[in-house]
Amino acid sequence: MSKHAVETQGLSKDFGTGDSVVRVLRGVDFEARHGEMTLLVGPSGCGKTTLISVIAGLLDKTGGAMAVLGTDTAALSSSEAVLFRRRNLGFVFQQYNLLPSLTAAENAAVPLLAAGMSRKAAVAKSSELLERLGMGPRLNALPNTLSGGQQQRVAIARALIHGPKLVVCDEPTAALDHESGHSVMKLLRETAVGPDRAVIVVTHDSRVFEFGDRIAHMDDGQITHVDTKGN
Amino acid sequence: MNFVAWKMLTGDKAKYLGLIFAIAFSTFLMSHQASIFCGLMNRTRSQILDVRDASIWVMDPKTQYLDEVKSLPDQDLYRVRGTEAVEWAVPLFKGLARTRVHRDGSFRGTILMGVDDVSLVGGPQDMALGKLDALLQPDSIILDRVGYKFFFPGEPLELGKQVEINDHLLTVAGICNSSAPFVNLPVAYARYSIAIKLVGSERNLMSFIVAQPRKGLSADDAARRISAATGLRAETASDFGWRTIWYYIQNTGIPINFGITVLIALIVGTVVAGQTFYLFTLENLKQFGALKAIGVTNMRITGMILMQAAIVGSIGYCIGIAMTAAFFEATKNNLDLRGFYMLPEIMKGVAVTVAGIAFLASVVSVRKVVVLEPAVVFRG
Ligand SMILES: Nc1ncnc2c1ncn2[C@@H]1O[C@H](COP(=O)(O)OP(=O)(O)O)[C@@H](O)[C@H]1O
Ligand SMILES: [Mg+2]
């Protein structure tokens, strides 16, 4: 049993087959600890998104070892992986990916609905969370009437509503202006991180580096070095 | 998740209405055209259905259907009566005559039915004005409402008017409701002896013999015995009706043409609904991907899409059927369109077809979503 939320050793991932194989992850040693926000930074195309996709069980690994909350997500069958994600993971995407015809409160309630909770109970719970995230006045607004920062708040509520142990965010501030980006990171920091909960944020926005407890630098499919808050 | 599926579907009003319209349109076309087809085919046996007091029809073996008849010699009537299968048997004349009104000389081909002089078997049962017995008066006929309306347009139903049939002056002694003949000509009834006098010169004029089976014998059995005993073709009214319908199905372009319309409605409905539904799914692909990443199973998503298709299918079907029903309701009092209505079988058949369309339309979308890699949600 691993002691960290996420640990990978020599993780590799290839795309394509035969002559056109591209090795995107080339032996990644990465960790994300409980109670911390881990930033994954690096130039575009270095494999950050691929790495968190493998960690989240959205892609299979090609080689290496990995434990996510004690489970090798790449070894799960696809239906087990779906269940695992539903129970343990929360996602925040760059493009928010909210359902356009659902209200803010309904969007944030989707993971609860997917787990079988009734609409009423789920929306009540998500409304409560959205209020805490400062979205109280816009509970019934449709996504296209919300600003980018507000949509990302709804997406964060959706990622947290079911109390996941691991929250994975891919460039959550890339589509936002500096101020909104800052407040979204602050919100994630305050609400997503907890003693038994870990957050991984992929970013190449150096302005938000201050929020990370640990910053893993990635280049060309490998982790080059890790900075921790202390030094 | 059902309400999520519902909201996804109805969130885009234009697409939602487009889908419903496509289904409603093809439902209407299919049910309307199929109903008209069935009504038209049913009309071919109208004069058989209108003879309600005899269950067996006897005719020359060469007679293929109701409207083209090889006449029987008189002695055949006695041969049929001679079989112990029948309670009674009477002659029936069916022919075409030219009816004319003196006032303005307007004329029209008319189906002339000659019914037994004594029993009046085969006479109209559904009288709009007057009684069947009126045929017993000299030189009298019963004319149907279509004929009356044509020869005396705008005049109220009234007995005692005069018409000429093949230059013989006759009195309209009764007005009846007839089932619409295939070509929707007027129908006139006279006694057999008058009818053959009107038409005239041929040696044999007996079109049919209609009969009723002896007590305790089914019409089927009796018909079989008559055939065996006389060598004539004898069959039940229902069998003769169906044989007439089949004749029209096999010998006219009607079924093919209606079939083509129904097929086009089917194809257009499927293609438009399928296309719209597919585009709708494509546009939501990212959202479906997000749902998959979040942990919604493929089964669940398939259920959502099928539910969306079922909703659209049911609403579209109901609207389309309502349109067809409204059409037949609006035309039910039109004399020329009588006999056209929607059969329950057609409603059921179209329901099954629409369910098929909705299913096909969603299958492509389901496939697309099921094979979707949830990892796409991270791609820009
Ligand atoms: N499905 C795929 N098939 C082939 N190549 C891919 C696929 N996904 C990503 N790649 C390639 O892998 C590399 C890393 O991509 P990605 O993980 O998205 O980088 P980052 O998120 O760091 O910008 C890129 O060169 C990209 O083209
Ligand atoms: Mg990326």
Image (cartoon, coloured by chain):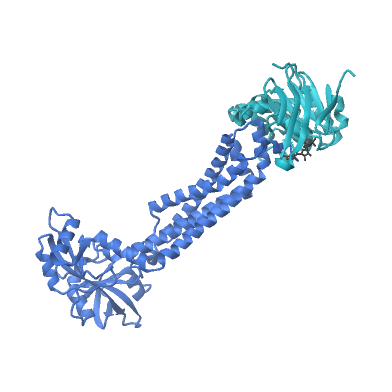
Chain colours: A cyan, B blue
Image quadrant where residue B102 sits: bottom left
Q: Is residue B64 above or below residue A195?
A: below
Place of residue B372 in the rendered image (x, y in percent of width and height, measured from the top left): 64, 40
Q: How many marks?
A: 0
Place of residue B279 in the rendered image (x, y in percent of width and height, measured from the top left): 63, 49
Quarter placement of the N terminus of chain B: top right
Q: Is residue B197 above or below residue A70?
A: below
Residue drawn at 43 percent across, 64 percent down: B256
Q: Is residue B356 above or below residue B165?
A: above
Image quadrant where residue B327 sits: bottom left
Place of residue B370 in the rendered image (x, y in percent of width and height, measured from the top left): 60, 39
Quarter placement of the C terminus of chain B: top right
Place of residue B211 in the rendered image (x, y in percent of width and height, measured from the top left): 17, 63
Q: B251 or B122: nearer the eye? A: B251
Ligand 2 picture quarter: top right
Looking at this view, name the residue that lies furthest to the front: A19
Looking at this view, name the residue that lies furthest to the right: A231
Image quadrant where residue B52 sits: bottom left
Q: Is residue A7 left or right of residue B212?
A: right
Q: A142 or B303: nearer the eye? A: B303
Residue drawn at 55 percent across, 37 percent down: B303
Q: Is residue B21 left or right of residue A130?
A: left
